[in-house]
Amino acid sequence: MADETLLSGAGETRGDPTRTAVMTGAALFMVSLDNLVVTTALPKIRESLHTGLSGLEWTVNSYTLTFAVLLLTASAVADRFGRRRLFGIGMAIFTLASAAAALAPGIGTLIAARAAQGLGAAIVMPLTLTMLSAAFPPEKRGAALGIWGTIGGLAVALGPVAGGIVIDSVSWQWIFWINVPIGVLLLVLLPGWLAESKGASTRLDITGTVLASAGLFGLVLGLIRGNTAGWTSAEVVLSLIAGTGLLALFLVWESRTPTPMLPLRLFRSVSFSAVNAVAMLMYFGMFGAIFLLTQFIQNVQGVSPLGAGVRLLAWTALTLVGAPIGGILSDKIGGKPIVFVGMVLQALGLAWIAVVLSETTTFPDLLPAFLVSGLGMGLYFGPAANLALGSVSRSEEGIASGANNAIREIGGVFGVAVLSAMFSASGGYSSKHDMVTGMQPAMWVGAAVVGLGALAALLIRGGNPQEAAASGAGSQAPAQKVSQAAPQAVLARETSGPVKSADQAAAVL
């Protein structure tokens, strides 16, 4: 292993930059890929494991929900006990969970394995940026983080295609098996390729984590079980009441504990609240729509998993075009109008899909809507990180970016749950007609929710590059302008040193 150079800041070491980039890049690609790779496998999983809509929902949501809720806590644990150590633990959990998912004999085992994958991803993903930043000197850090952002973006964009290739070539189980040799190799290389470092040691908010997890689980359970058990059934009503009550207790606890996982003082900023509302509503529409569309393309249009993934590439890959455009434009006119336009385009894309959906809809019919939605997502992503960080004081950027990441993932969880409930209430899997009948109201609801996100974007303050972004709670001085490149945004105000907290790594992917 190359000699490590002690950096400024307690517990910071600099390992070999090339080895660190390879390790963190491979880990980032693997855990990011699993966010959407499973979507193209949903019809095959439904047939193979004899499950229904609720089982498919939990297959997606168990990963996303665990990731969202445990992200902030996992970052704090890594800062306290060592980032390389926690990176290894997270990678081991993710690898073992992938094997368990591949071997799952039933839907219950698969859901549990996906939840464990989410835990591993919550540990690993933010640490990839933290350790990569620490390995490079300031003058080379921007280029390294640009590559980091590209890897993450490609993983998300290629997820459905990669899943389709594996499923068509072997079986759906191999979308999980493929993680195992990569994870094992990274664990073998870990001791000699990554340097250990620590961040500030803070008390862990275990109570807040438990309350948030249980509350969100109760709400999602009620939404998923509503159409099956009946919306007035004791099971559903009690789940929704318990979930709401636990989340209320979570907010009370967070307002009183001296070390909250989610400092509520941040939301005193109108701009920060608006930025997070936009993120949640955007992910609501995106995840909910893609969850249903991958099944529509295969079940109604009769396309293979690979064909479905290639078709969705028109949506996901265009974000790689829209994001740089959004970043460049936001440097000139500010991020607020770019985010607004992006959300409007996303809403128009979903509404377009709702209009053209039928049993005879072809891919050319859907292509314009996919392109519009993809461009809208990209325009949103361009300035999103800058706006999130620019709405708080410099000292609170780490927790702010972590909170923004968690909130947007929770939006995706509720998007899948709510749009699936709309789908199940009006249609189902029994025929092509039923599937189309169920999807149309779901797409309209998705479009309306994203439209609300566009209105929320109008409440964002300080979006003009000439304005001082000083609206963050507790800010004592105008915040400096932040770079629009998503992976660099978390570092723009720390150009003389590495990311000090794993929370700061929770930037937009």
Image (spheres, grey):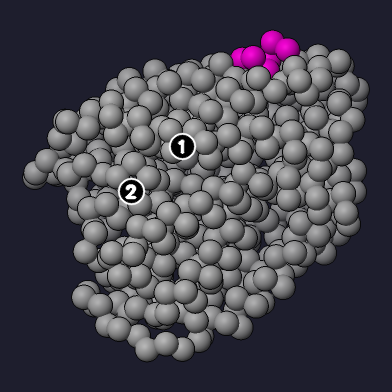
Examine the rendered structure and indicate whether residue 443 appears above or below residue 464: above
Which amino acid type is shown beneath numbered disc 2? Ala
Distance between the alpha carbons at the discs numbered 2 and 1: 13 Å
The residue labelled by disc 2 is 489
| Residue at 54% in and 60% down | 28
| Residue at 34% in and 62% down | 141
Residue 464: percent from the left, percent from the top?
Answer: 23, 28
Is residue 438 visible in this depiction of the protein? no
In the image, is 20 to the left or to the right of 224?
Answer: left
The residue labelled by disc 1 is 323
| Residue at 83% in and 47% down | 45
Residue 420: percent from the left, percent from the top?
Answer: 69, 29
Q: Secondary structure at mark 2?
A: helix
Part of the protein shown in magenta = 351-356
Picture quarter containing residue 362?
Answer: top right
Which amino acid type is shown beneath numbered disc 1? Ala
